[in-house]
Image (cartoon, coloured by chain):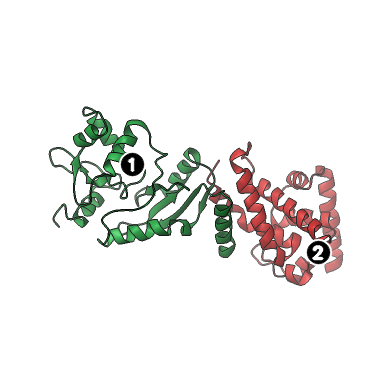
Chain colours: A red, B green
């Protein structure tokens, strides 16, 4: 396995972007710490190092889900998500607010596809559903965003 | 992001997950890579060595839990700064010898006892390590010293008085010996 620091250098920005979209800017930091500590704990016994980015993003998603469960709600404070800078050029605030308002599965699919550039198969792995279901969530999410932002 | 990563390194250390902490430090010769384990300083990379390669080697040979954590190396950096200023003649840092073993380890331990401002030759090092005929192997042990400067392999010269070799290049060896007053300017 490569030095863990290379995972941080290469993917910390993506992980933070996923978490900001999933739990909001205010709570993303805590989830970010939990994600990387969990990854660091498991890293020496990780059998397959071929997709470290997907592995990290999967952990981030679990931490986001844990976070939502702990809060017993479906948050995403819109005003905070709006500050996310994911890619260059900076995505506009209204778009991210709308992404934040999507149902959880659609929101996750859209974030993984466009903030993290994951293919459908990896979105499916991350969400624990079939590739077809991931494609459908993404499609529904995009359709809804088009309508919201039209 | 910088604050997040600093916090991560601190928490990793508290939870016993920081197996190898590293940083880079300025020196009169260029950037040094400093790496430590919970046991002590494990690696000093000289300016002419590729830091990325050294980190990969540490990940393979010590642990892949390698994190940049400058705070963990404050004391090493402080002592090295003083040494380069000529204000410190004995390092007081715990060392982790786990990158060396056998005869090489014995040679390096013998080297670590050579006082500041003194020199030995490769034959003497081979003898100290328990095999006076293994002069060439003693030379190799010096060349593969994972903790140069702190384990002062620059104080080992050829029997005839020649400088011998140095992983950081001969000009660096010469300057370290000048700093310690062994060689004139």
> Which residue bears the numbered disc 1?
B145
Q: How dense is the environment of label 2, judged by Cα within 10 Å: few (below 14), some, or many (20 and up)? A: some
> Which residue bears the numbered disc 2?
A75
- Of A100 and A136, nearer the camera is A100
The secondary element bearing badge 1 is classed as loop
Specify the quadrant of the image occupied by residue B164. top left
Whether residue B24 can be seen here: yes
Give the residue displayed 26% in from the left and 36% down from the top.
B139
- Classify the position of the N terminus of chain B by image quarter: bottom right
Q: Which chain letter matches label 1?
A: B
- Of B151 and A13, nearer the camera is B151
Whether residue B25 can be seen here: no
Q: Is residue A102 left or right of residue A86?
A: right
- Classify the position of the C terminus of chain B by image quarter: bottom left
- Of B106 and A112, nearer the camera is B106
Question: Number of callouts in the render?
Answer: 2
| Residue B41 % position (x, y) | 41, 49
Give the residue displayed 45% in from the left and 55% down from the top.
B23
Q: CA distance from mark 2 to mark 1?
A: 55 Å
Specify the quadrant of the image occupied by residue B112. top left
| Residue B12 % position (x, y) | 57, 53
Do circles 2 and 1 both sit on a common chain?
Answer: no
Can you say whether B26 is above or below A51 in the image? below
Q: Which chain letter matches label 2?
A: A
Q: How dense is the environment of label 1, judged by Cα within 10 Å: few (below 14), some, or many (20 and up)? A: many
Give the residue displayed 55% in from the left and 56% down from the top.
B9
Image mark for residue B161: none
| Residue B17 % position (x, y) | 57, 48
Q: Are marks 2 and 1 in contact (CB under 8 Å)?
A: no
């Amino acid at each position: 396995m490569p030095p863990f620091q290379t995972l941080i250098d290469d993917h910390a920005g993506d992980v933070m972007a996923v978490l900001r979209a999933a739990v909001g800017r205010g709570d993303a930091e805590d989830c970010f710490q939990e994600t990387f500590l969990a990854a660091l704990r498991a890293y020496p016994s990780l059998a397959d190092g071929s997709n470290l980015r997907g592995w990290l993003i999967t952990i981030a998603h679990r931490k986001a889900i844990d976070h939502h469960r702990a809060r017993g709600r479906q948050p995403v404070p819109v005003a905070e998500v709006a500050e996310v800078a994911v890619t260059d050029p900076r995505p506009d605030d209204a778009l991210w607010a709308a992404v934040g308002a999507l149902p959880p599965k659609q929101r996750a699919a859209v974030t993984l596809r466009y903030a993290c550039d994951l293919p459908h198969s990896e979105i499916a792995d991350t969400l624990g559903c079939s590739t077809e279901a991931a494609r459908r969530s993404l499609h529904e999410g995009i359709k809804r965003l088009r309508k919201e932002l039209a | 992001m910088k604050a997040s990563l600093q916090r991560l390194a601190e928490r990793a250390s508290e939870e016993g997950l920081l197996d190898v902490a590293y940083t880079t430090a300025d020196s009169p010769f260029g950037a040094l890579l400093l790496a430590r384990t919970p046991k002590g300083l494990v690696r000093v990379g000289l300016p002419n060595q590729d830091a990325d390669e050294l980190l990969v080697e540490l990940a393979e040979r010590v642990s892949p839990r390698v994190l940049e954590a400058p705070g963990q190396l404050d004391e090493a950096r402080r002592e090295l700064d003083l040494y380069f200023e000529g204000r410190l003649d004995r390092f007081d840092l715990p060392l982790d010898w786990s990158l060396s073993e056998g005869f090489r380890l014995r040679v390096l331990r013998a080297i670590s006892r050579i006082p500041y401002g003194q020199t030995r030759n490769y034959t003497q090092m081979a003898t100290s390590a328990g095999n006076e005929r293994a002069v060439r192997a003693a030379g190799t042990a010096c060349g593969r010293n994972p903790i140069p400067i702190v384990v002062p392999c620059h104080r080992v010269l050829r029997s005839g008085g020649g400088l011998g070799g140095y992983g950081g290049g001969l000009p660096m060896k010469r300057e370290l010996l000048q700093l310690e007053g062994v060689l004139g300017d």
